[in-house]
């Protein structure tokens, strides 16, 4: 019996050690999060910052195989109410907004807003006129774009042929008359 007693603790120890080394969740939680969050809470935040809904972020971060959707929503809401998580989400979303400011569409919108402000509030009339000129050149406004009108009145092939023959007759008559 002593052999069985001795072998069980060894197997349990080896199994426990293997779990700690191989479990991603356990391994990541060994390193203290500066905010005191768990691995799953950090994954929830990452999923939220990628644009997922709170419920979807919860499903990505937690095992929800045996949970009803209502409970998933409740747990996601509870996480959103967590003071550290909500603060980190606000910081993350603010950083995303600042980054988006430098994207094309946001930058165009920023320029438009500044030009409108200058056109309305500039000290000199020259600055106001210049701002209005630049606003007029924007694609949305297109006040100063050249507009070409095309005649879409198409002639029948017979009419075009008759016009060409008449012009050729006149041209030949002029050449034969002058020689």
Image: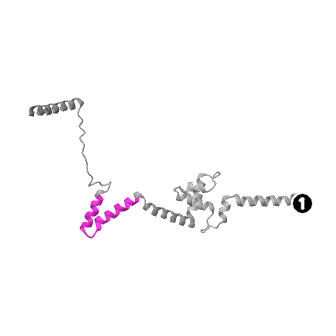
Residue at 57% x, 67% y is 84
Residue situated in front as seen by the camera: 10 or 75: 10
How far across and how far down the image is residue 67, in percent? 63, 52
Seen as rendered, the residue at the extreme right is 1
The question of residue 115 being in magenta is answered with: yes
Residue that appears at 25% across and 43% down: 150
Name the residue nearer the viewer: 55 or 60.
60
Residue 21 is inside the magenta segment: no
Q: Specify few, some or many for label 1: CA neighbours under 10 Å numbering under 14, 14-19, or 20 or more.
A: few
Pointer 1 residue: 2
Between 73 and 161, the one lying in front of the other is: 161
* Left or right side of 146 for 109: right
- The overriding secondary structure of the stretch rendered in magenta is helix
Identify whether 69 is placed above or below 31. Answer: above
Count of labels in the image: 1
Please state if 134 lies on the left or on the right of 48 as rendered: left
From the top left corner, tell me how far across and down residue 174 is, in percent: 11, 34
Q: In which quarter of the image is the N terminus?
A: bottom right
Residue at the image position 63 percent from the left and 61 percent from the top: 39
Give the quadrant of residue 56: bottom right
Start-end of magenta stretch: 106-135
- Can you say which quadrant of the picture contains the C terminus? top left
- In this view, the residue farthest toward the bottom is 123
Q: In which quarter of the image is residue 176?
A: top left
Give left or right: position of 56 versus 102.
right
In the image, residue 77 lies at what x, y percent?
A: 56, 59
Specify whether 1 is left or right of 71: right
Per the image, label 1 sits on a secondary structure element best described as helix
User: What sort of colour scheme is used for the picture?
Assistant: one colour
Identity of the residue furthest to the front in this view: 179
Image location (x, y in percent) of residue 11? 80, 58
């Amino acid at each position: 019996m002593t052999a069985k007693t001795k072998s069980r603790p060894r197997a349990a120890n080896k199994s426990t050690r293997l779990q700690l080394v191989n479990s991603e969740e356990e391994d990541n939680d060994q390193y203290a999060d500066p905010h005191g969050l768990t691995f799953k809470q950090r994954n929830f935040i990452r999923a939220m910052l990628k644009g997922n809904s709170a419920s979807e972020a919860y499903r990505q971060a937690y095992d929800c195989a045996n949970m009803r959707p209502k409970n998933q929503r409740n747990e996601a809401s509870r996480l959103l109410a967590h003071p550290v998580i909500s603060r980190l989400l606000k910081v993350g979303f603010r950083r995303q907004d600042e980054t988006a400011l430098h994207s094309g569409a946001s930058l165009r919108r920023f320029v438009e807003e500044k030009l409108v402000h200058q056109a309305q509030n500039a000290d000199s009339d020259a600055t106001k006129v210049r701002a209005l000129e630049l606003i007029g050149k924007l694609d949305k406004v297109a006040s100063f774009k050249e507009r070409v009108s095309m005649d879409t009145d198409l002639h029948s092939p017979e009419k075009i042929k008759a016009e060409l023959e008449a012009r050729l007759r006149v041209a030949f008559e002029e050449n034969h008359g002058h020689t």
